Amino acid sequence: MAKQDAPLTGEALIKEVCRRIRVARSYWDAHKNAACRGERERALTLYNTLTKEQKQQIPQVLRVWLRYRSEKYFGAHRTPPKSRLPRR
C-alpha cells in the first residue's frame, strides 16, 4: 500500500482504524495468523493515536476484539511465530 502524504485526522482516522480492525478480524476468521498479526499491529498503532472521545466512536465490538480478545492470542506472553524458512 502506498504511503500517504498527510497523516489521517478526525473522521478519516476513525474510519481507517475500523477498517483495519475489520480486515484483521477477517484474516483471523480465515486462520491467516501472520497476516492478522500484522494488520492488528497497524490497527493498534492507529488506535493508540486516538483521543478518548474518538475511541468511543469506534464500535464496541471492534474495540473489544482489538484490545482484549486478540491480546489473548497475540500478546507479548505468547510464543513468537516461527520462521517460514525450511530447515537444512
Image (cartoon, rainbow, N blue to C red):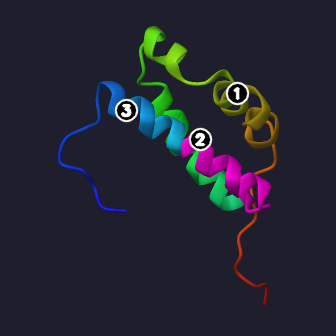
Mark 3 is surrounded, within 10 Å at the Cα level, by few (under 14), some (14 to 19) or many (20 or more) other residues, namely some
Residue at 79% over, 36% down = 77
What element does badge 3 sit on? helix
Q: Amino acid at mark 3?
A: Leu
Does the segment drawn in magenta span residue 23? yes
Q: Earlier in the sequence, mark 1 or mark 3?
A: 3
Relative to residue 46, is residue 80 depicted above or below? below
Q: Amino acid at mark 1?
A: Val
How far separated are the C-alphas under marks 2 and 3?
Answer: 12 Å
Q: Is residue 82 magenta?
A: no
- The reply to whether the C-beta atoms of the residues labelled 1 and 3 are less than 8 Å apart is no
Within 10 Å of the Cα at label 1, are there few (<14), some (14-19), or many (20+) other Cα atoms?
A: few
Q: For the residue labelled by badge 2, is the local secondary structure a helix, a strand or a loop?
A: helix
* Residue at the image position 51 percent from the left and 43 percent from the top: 19
Q: Which numbered disc flags the more N-terminal residue, 2 or 3?
A: 3
Q: Quadrant of the N terminus?
A: bottom left
Going from N to C along the chain, the mark reached first, 2 or 1, is 2
Which of the 4 quarters of the picture holds residue 31?
bottom right
Residue that badge 3 annotates: 13
| Residue 54, quarter of picture | top left
Q: Residue furthest bottom?
A: 88
Q: Position of residue 36 (x, y in %)?
A: 66, 53
Residue marked by disc 1: 61
Residue 7 at x, y percent in the picture: 25, 38
The quarter holding residue 61 reads: top right
Segment tinted magenta in the rendering: 20-33
Residue under label 2: 21
